[in-house]
Image: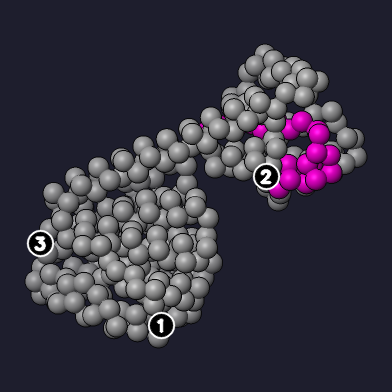
Amino acid sequence: MDGEEGLSVFIAKTPDIVITDIKMPIMDGIEMIKNIKQRSPDTPVVITTAFTDVSYMIKAIELRADAYVKKPIDKDDLFNLLNKILTRIQTDDTSVIKREVLLLRDRYEKMKRMLMGAVEAASHAFASVDHFTADHQRRVAGLSEAIVAEMSLSEDIIFKIKIAAMLHDIGKMQVPAEILTKPAGLTEIERAVVKTHAMAGYEFLRKIDFTFPLADIVLQHHEKYNGSGYPLGLNGNNILVEARVLNVADVVEAMSSSRPYRPSLGLDMALGEISDRKGVLYDPDVVDACLNVFEKDFKFQE
């Protein structure tokens, strides 16, 4: 059953309690809870989760979902939970719900801190092998974070983009160092080897169970708005928004910084590149946000 069907059943039968998953086709659990609570604020709602959907759980509880139960669902645990909810309603005791919200938020923040710590540790380890790429990733992360904030996207996306930016070139660990640090222009074959880093990064990261599609963001960060990028040739909104942001930040940082084979081309040239090719190679909204960030005197951290 999808969310729309679930809402139709609720409207037709007005059950005493609702149990729903979060991720469903057509209408997800978040939207269904919102609709149910608008129609019947006092109807208890229980969400089921595999504990990887923490941000969704927070949204559900903020919409006044009454509790959650972990998958796989234990029948006895579920019945006990339903009894507690009914008792809670009868006594009008909301303190337990408030404690659950605070506990869930605390758990989510701890998870974010742990993930960020692990990523920073990986970045430091990478720096010992290739400090140039590690510095590039750190600077791209700073610009990407500023762009997403300028676009008024959610805190969740800001967190995701920072993680992805700090790892977006991790696949270059499989590119020979003599190519990455070559003081002259690359040959056609060498450029082809460098281009494998997006897929290499994806293959490395997809084996790790992140709570968001980190591997796909890394895979897509060289895709172009008109479909001329690599490795998949995706275009427009078929490219994840985080990857579209990374693509712009990556180009600006790379052009405005010194490379092993050339000096910096300058920030003006870098901003001119994304401005001239806005809507062709680069997402127009991302470009506008990036230009605004620099108009507000953004500076790369050294």
Q: Which percent across, then down, holds residue 14? A: 88, 35
Which residue is more in the foreground, 121 or 9? 121
Identify the residue position indicated by label 3 in the image: 178
> Which label's residue is closer to the chain start, 1 or 2?
2
Cβ–Cβ below 8 Å for labels 3 and 1?
A: no
Position of residue 257 relative to residue 87, above or below, is below
Q: In this rendering, would 206 be left or right of 39?
A: left
Badge 1 marks a residue whose secondary structure is: helix
Which residue appears at 65% of the width and 41% of the height? Answer: 62
Which residue is more in the foreground, 188 or 66? 66
Quarter holding residue 189: bottom left
Q: In this rendering, would 265 be left or right of 33?
A: left
Is 34 colored magenta in this rendering? yes
Under mark 2, the amino acid is Ile
Q: Which percent across, then down, holds residue 206? A: 39, 45
Identify the residue position indicated by label 1 in the image: 275
Instruction: Give the magenta range.
Output: 29-51
Identify the residue position indicated by label 2 in the image: 30
Position of residue 275 relative to residue 125, above or below, is below
